[in-house]
Image (cartoon, rainbow, N blue to C red):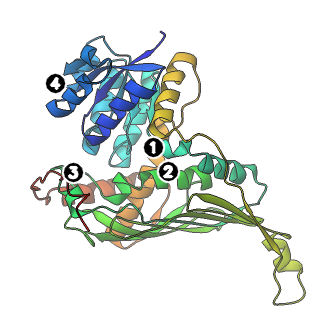
Amino acid sequence: MEQVRFGLVGLGSMGLQHAKTIMESVREGRLAAVASRNEKHISVLRGLPGGDALCVFDTPKEMYESGCIDAVLIASPHRAHVVQAKEAFACGMHVLLEKPTGVFTREVRELNEAAERSGKAFGVMFNQRTNPVYRKMKEIVASGELGEIRRTSVIITDWFRAQSYYDSGAWRATWKQDGGGVLLNQAPHNLDLWQWICGMPVKVHAFCGFGRWHDVEIEDDVTAYVEYANGATGTFITCTGEVPGTNRFEISMDGGQLVYENGRLILAKPETPASVFIREYPGGFGQPAVTREDITPEGEYPMHAGVIRAFARHILYGEDLVAQGCEGLSSLMLANAMVLSGWTGKSVELPMDEAADAAFEALLVGHASKSKERVVKPIDLNVASSFK
């Protein structure tokens, strides 16, 4: 095999972007087929170089069984992810899945088992892991050179969305079809980075605003507090209703602090680790001298193209994936635990056990049964230039 023949499931705005990325930026693969009935976006692809040879199918299974693809990238609405991915594995496909890997943890555990049984490649689209800054942060934390983590803080409130965004699709912003809000749609990237770099906490307590800023059912504002096994604590704050918003990731360790904000990674390092200074300093009010250094790494940030290229190279040459599909469980578990805590007002122990899984799923089903049909209002792409 010289190139991976990709199929694409779902041709909405994200699916169309992935299709263009494969066609224009992934030399290790080519887009061979799509399963979609979006005639407008199919026409767009037909007009691109190589688009005239594209095979089009009405259903994913027809495409899986066609013999014209080796792997599939699934970019459909969340509720369909697990079903379509399991079907693909059963048909012998390699699977690259958009985030989130599912809506609740039980179904994702089952998907991970199906992937393992299939023996096929399974990746998840955590494209922000390709950012050199986050890779540098992970390298420093994992090295232990700054000691144990004492506190983590993620403020990711620049995921702003207008009401028109939620109104642009019938599946958006309902428990029945979307399955969640900011924690499932926008912040999975940040939840993934948080646990990828800092590890999973053992307890979470969250306060969720359901439709706080928009006319929606789902959570659009979340503040969560977590505890780690070593006694460290952390906070995670996100919303889609704040302007200008903040994107800040802070990790405080015994021997220093990492802060990523405004595109720069700053390392603040005391002359003496905090734990030593606390025990040994005799002067009461002093603190160790601190040096600050900009350690922002240079390097390519290939985003989605980087994930897709790595996935293709994994199939062709056995190289590492950017993110294994099974890793999608951790960020989803954090999201589920936060929403469960928001619904019940109680802390949730991690990892979630069967009882917690069942409690979340039951509450989700209950909320989904009350979901209202949404009136779709297509986004007006001409309004941006005139709106003040």
Image quadrant holding the C terminus, namely bottom left
Disc 2: which residue:
192
Contact, CB < 8 Å: mark 1 with mark 2? yes
Q: CA distance from mark 2 to mark 3?
A: 31 Å
Contact, CB < 8 Å: mark 4 with mark 2? no
Q: Quadrant of residue 18?
A: top left
Q: For this view, does 38 lie left or right of residue 235?
A: left
Q: Counting residues from the N terminus, which is met first, the one under dot 3 or under dot 4?
A: 4
Residue sitting at the far front = 386
Where residue 201 sits in the image (x, y, percent)?
55, 60
Identity of the amino acid at label 2? Answer: Asp
Residue at 35% x, 59% y: name it.
182
Q: Within 10 angstroms of label 3, few (less than 14), some, or many (20 or more) residues?
A: few
Where residue 189 sits in the image (x, y, percent)?
46, 50
Residue at 23% x, 68% y: name it.
214
Where residue 281 sits in the image (x, y, percent)?
88, 82
* Relative depth, front residue between 5 and 315: 5
Q: Counting residues from the N terminus, which is met first, the one under dot 1 or under dot 4?
A: 4
User: Which of the numbered marks, if any, corresponds to residue 381?
Assistant: 3
